[in-house]
């Protein structure tokens, strides 16, 4: 990420301007493989997990989520797994919530 694509915070940390939004509130969602899923199914939640992991692997360091999205557990687990597999450090991640 280019230096200009982040906002410098008063702490000196740099908040990426581009982040992954995890709001997938549509009647149906598509998996990464193109399969149509009903909202809130277990496979739909798995998609939130897989998409978050893929975004972190692709370089995203800013993840936006919210209680109302009903996928915080999966998003959190994806972040934790990417920290544990050493893809990213926790100090490099920004997680915003509402």
Image: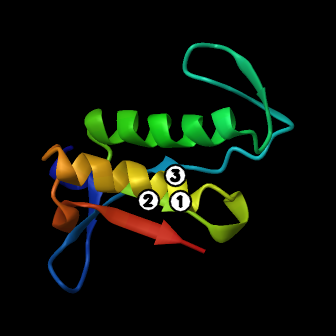
Residue 73 percent location from the top left of the image: 53, 59
Residue that label 3 marks: 74
Residue at figure coordinates x 14%, y 78% from the top left: 12
Which residue is at the far top?
A: 34
In the visual, does 13 lie left or right of 27?
Answer: left
| Left or right placement of residue 52 versus residue 21 in this view | left
Give the quarter of the image for residue 35.
Answer: top right
Q: Are marks 1 and 2 in contact (CB under 8 Å)?
A: yes
Separation (CA) of disc 1 from disc 3: 4 Å
Quadrant (top left, top right, bottom left, bottom right) of the N terminus: top left
Task: Return the residue nearer the eye: 65 or 2.
Answer: 65
The image's mark for residue 25 is: none
Give the labeled residue for mark 2. 76
Residue for point 48% across, 35% down: 51
Structural distance between the alpha carbons of marks 1 and 2: 5 Å
Which residue extends farthest right?
Answer: 27
- Which x, y percent locates residue 60? 32, 45
Are circles 3 and 2 on residues that touch, CB within 8 Å?
A: yes
In-front residue for pair 43/36: 43
Q: Residues within 10 Å of mark 3 (few under 14, many from 20)?
A: some
Q: Is residue 97 above or below residue 25?
A: below
Residue placed under numbered mark 1 in the picture: 73
Q: Secondary structure at mark 1?
A: helix
Name which residue lies at 65% across and 50% down: 23
């Amino acid at each position: 990420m280019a230096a200009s694509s982040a906002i410098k915070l008063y702490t000196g940390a740099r908040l990426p301007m581009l982040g992954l939004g995890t709001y997938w509130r549509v009647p149906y969602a598509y998996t990464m493989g193109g399969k149509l899923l009903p909202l809130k199914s277990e496979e739909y939640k798995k998609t939130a997990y897989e998409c978050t992991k893929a975004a972190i692997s692709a370089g995203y360091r800013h993840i936006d989520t919210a209680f109302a999205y009903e996928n915080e557990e999966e998003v959190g687990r994806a972040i934790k797994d990417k920290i544990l597999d050493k893809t990213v450090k926790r100090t490099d991640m920004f997680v915003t919530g509402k």
